Image (cartoon, rainbow, N blue to C red):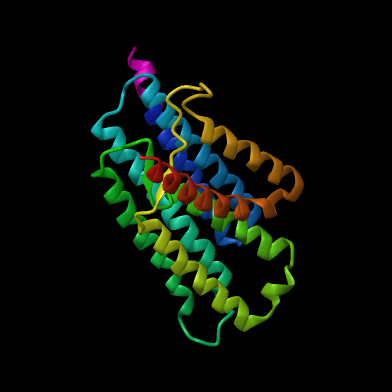
Amino acid sequence: MITIKIIPNILTLSNLFCGCISIIFLRSKNFDYSAIATLFSIIFDFLDGFFSRLTKNENPFGKELDSLADMVSFGIVPSIIVFSLLEKKSPIPFIEYLAFLISIISACRLARFNITPHKNYIKGLTTPINALFFSSLSIIITDHHVFFFKKKMIYIITMLFIIFLSCYFLLSKIPMFSFNFEDFSWKKNKMRYFFLLISIFLLLTLHVVALPCIIIFYIIISICFHRLKKNSY
């Protein structure tokens, strides 16, 4: 029984470990391996929440530990990604340090999440999804050589715009549907399954390029779903 209770915390620490590994890869600007480590962090983060609910073992210690792990894996990692992508690219000194706004806003978001009652939806973009966006974006920019990003000024302006947009969605009160499965029934998870099916289709056709598209789609579908739900009352 004691072993079962510590499984969520072990998974949380695994999330933290993968976040640390991701930072190590980013030191040498190895965005591909960093993205893989971040993906494992997201998987462990999902599993620790799932096992906590499954074993009915949600406690203050686990909650705080989860936030601390998330701060590293999903708060610091995306900031270092953006810092690395902007470093020595701009004629404006120290502009790359604006990347750490993501860490600051992520900390605020995680603190707010800890004191907010949990519902079947969450407000604003979650830090794991935000981290996944930047991880996939780093691969697209460095490996796919997109023509749009070759223009230096357009590249810098776009990156700064993405930073501020990311910070806005992290702290926004826009309702986003949660990926926390209470069970796997179709009735309670129709929206989640629909989203997953579309996401799988996009991944099979567009591969890594699909990830930012899926995240944008997630934001749009969340807004539309909750507006329709609100209008139905």
Q: Quadrant of residue 147?
A: bottom right
Q: Position of residue 198 (x, y in %)?
A: 65, 41
Query: Which residues fall within the magenta stretch?
Result: 1-7
Q: Quadrant of residue 45?
A: top left
Residue at x 56% of width, y 43% of height:
39
* Left or right, 225 with reference to 64: right
User: Is 41 or 118 nearer to us in this picture?
Assistant: 118
The answer to whether residue 73 is seen in the rendering is no
Which part of the image, by quadrant, shows the C terminus? top left
User: Is 188 or 180 nearer to us in this picture?
Assistant: 188
Which part of the image, by quadrant, shows the N terminus? top left
User: Across the whole image, how many numbered discs are drawn on residues?
Assistant: 0
User: For the view shown, which residue lies furthest in the front direction?
Assistant: 232
Q: Position of residue 159 (x, y in %)?
A: 54, 71
Residue at x 43% of width, y 52% of height:
125
Residue at x 50% of width, y 52% of height:
219
Secondary structure predominantly adopted by residues drawn in magenta: helix
Q: Position of residue 114 (x, y in %)?
A: 27, 44
Q: On screen, 1 above or below 9?
A: above
Q: Position of residue 17 (x, y in %)?
A: 47, 42
The answer to whether residue 221 is seen in the rendering is yes
